[in-house]
Image: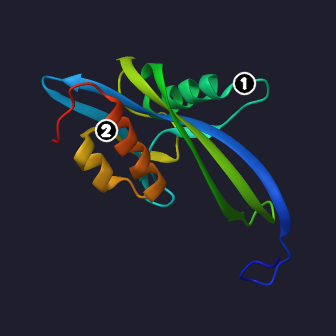
Amino acid sequence: MRDGTGTMMNVKAIEISAGGVVFRKKEDIYEVILFRKKSDRCWGLPKGKLEPGETAQEAALREVREETGAEAEIIGDLGEVHYRYRNIKRKAVVDKTVYFFLMKYLTGNIGSSEKNIDAVGWFSFDTAIEKATHESERAKLQTARSKLPDIARQ
């Protein structure tokens, strides 16, 4: 396979990541954390690659902490997302799987020390669903909302 420049691409690489929908209830409204990357200005859920020997749950909690400053606990499974993308640097077509978890916010100052993240914030579910750049993450936000008790449209 060739990329748009005519460079030959490897047929396939496999990438596994994990992340989560972190929520809190503030007064009577559920809020979730999103962050925005500097590079592409995309709003999304915290997630990242598993490190060697790490479980999906451990990676999800670590990525949430690194990308948002939040400490959270996993309270449910939100399933997985599969997609394929071209990684020009690795000259590969990557098959990616991301495992998502529903997480309850425990503590932490929201923000990121990572250089590639320029904004982190709390948003109502409706606002987060509108802001999230990728359809698969909007779907995970909708799934998370449906799993929370007594949640109403906000």
Asked if disc 1 and disc 2 are in contact, CB closer than 8 Å, the reply is no
- The crowd level at tag 2 (other Cα within 10 Å; few <14, some 14-19, many 20+) is some
Which of the marked residues, 1 or 2, is nearer the chain's N terminus? 1
User: Is any atom of residue 134 visible in this view?
Assistant: no
Q: Which mark is residue 54?
A: 1
Give the residue type that dot 2 points to: Gly
Instruction: Establish if 54 lies above or below 32.
Output: above
Q: Which residue is mark 2?
A: 121
Labelled disc at residue 71: none
Residue drawn 51% across the image and 58% down it:
39
Q: Position of residue 41 (x, y in %)?
A: 43, 59
Q: Out of 149 and 133, give the one closest to the viewer.
A: 149
Q: Residue at x 80, y 84 (%)?
A: 6
- Is 119 placed above or below 133 here? above
Name the mark nearer the viewer: 1 or 2: 1
- Determine whether, in the image, residue 13 is placed left or right of residue 132: right
Q: Looking at the image, which residue is at 78% across and 24% down?
A: 53
92 relative to 27 in the view: left or right: right
Question: Measured from the top left, where is residue 153 in percent x and y?
Answer: 17, 41
